[in-house]
Amino acid sequence: MLAGSEKGAHNPMMDRRQHALTCLREDRIMAVLRQIPAEHLVPLADLLVEGGVRSLEITYDYDRTLADVAMLADRFGAAASVGVGTTWSVEQAESAAAAGSTFCVLPGIDVETARRSVELGMLTLPGVQTPAEIQTAIRAGADVLKFFPADPPGAAWLAQVAPAYRQCPFMATGGVTNDNMQSFFDAGAIAVGMGDTLFGRYDDLDNARAMIATATTTASAPTSRH
């Protein structure tokens, strides 16, 4: 879990983790960028950041992952939070941190990988769906619990489980759309993770701009649960 450093001390790893959490809490959306072709990645990332989605997840399932993380981290600096998703191993977490990743998203709960991500100073978001997985993730040091997949089972599941684990926030990912996003916020999620349901086709920027604007408007609306 996030913790404060000693008074007066400067901890760059905590700075990185805190920056990632701040972007996620304020924008309430993480963009999942899965295997976006090189020529389309920068224009789409620019559009997302300009549109108010600063958390950019580069999935760890293609050979340009680390290069893309390093490139986007250098491009945006503190203006965005660039991290990795679909992280399976300690080695991947270490390579991501070295490339400049501010956060590390896991598809499930791998205790060793989660703990190493925490040690490396990245915001750590393991995937969970059951109370047993949630408790394991919290013990491993999770900063945010990635409810995955989110739909199914849907926001009603999260609304039942989240109150029992108020010490660690949730992000809903997988099956989240603009139509059901609000229901996950109302159920207790601090943020949602979205791929093409956020921006549509990566090569149609006009449509992407409109879709992003719609999503960020929804994300900025008040929730019925606090």
Image (cartoon, helix red, strand yellow):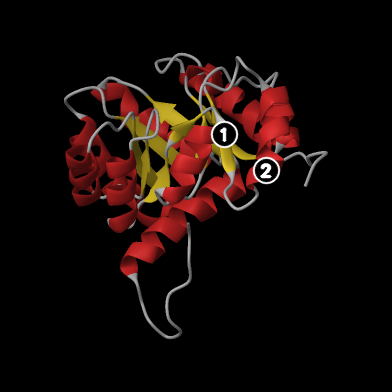
Cβ atoms at labels 2 and 1 below 8 Å apart: yes
Above or below residue 139? Residue 10 is below
The numbered disc on residue 164 is 2
Of labels 2 and 1, earlier in sequence is: 1
Query: Which residue is painted at 32% across and 49% down in the image?
Result: 115
Report the amino acid beneath label 2.
Answer: Ala
Find residue 172 and report its image quarter: top right
Neighbours of disc 1 within 10 Å: few (<14), some (14-19), many (20+): few
Spatial CA distance of label 2 from label 1 is 9 Å
Local SS, label 1: helix
Neighbours of disc 2 within 10 Å: few (<14), some (14-19), many (20+): few
In this rendering, position of residue 177 left or right of residue 9: right
The numbered disc on residue 68 is none
Query: Which residue is painted at 39% across and 28% down in the image?
Result: 107
Local SS, label 2: helix
Residue for badge 1: 131
Q: Do we see residue 218 in this rendering? A: no
Query: Which residue is painted at 73% across and 27% down in the image?
Result: 183
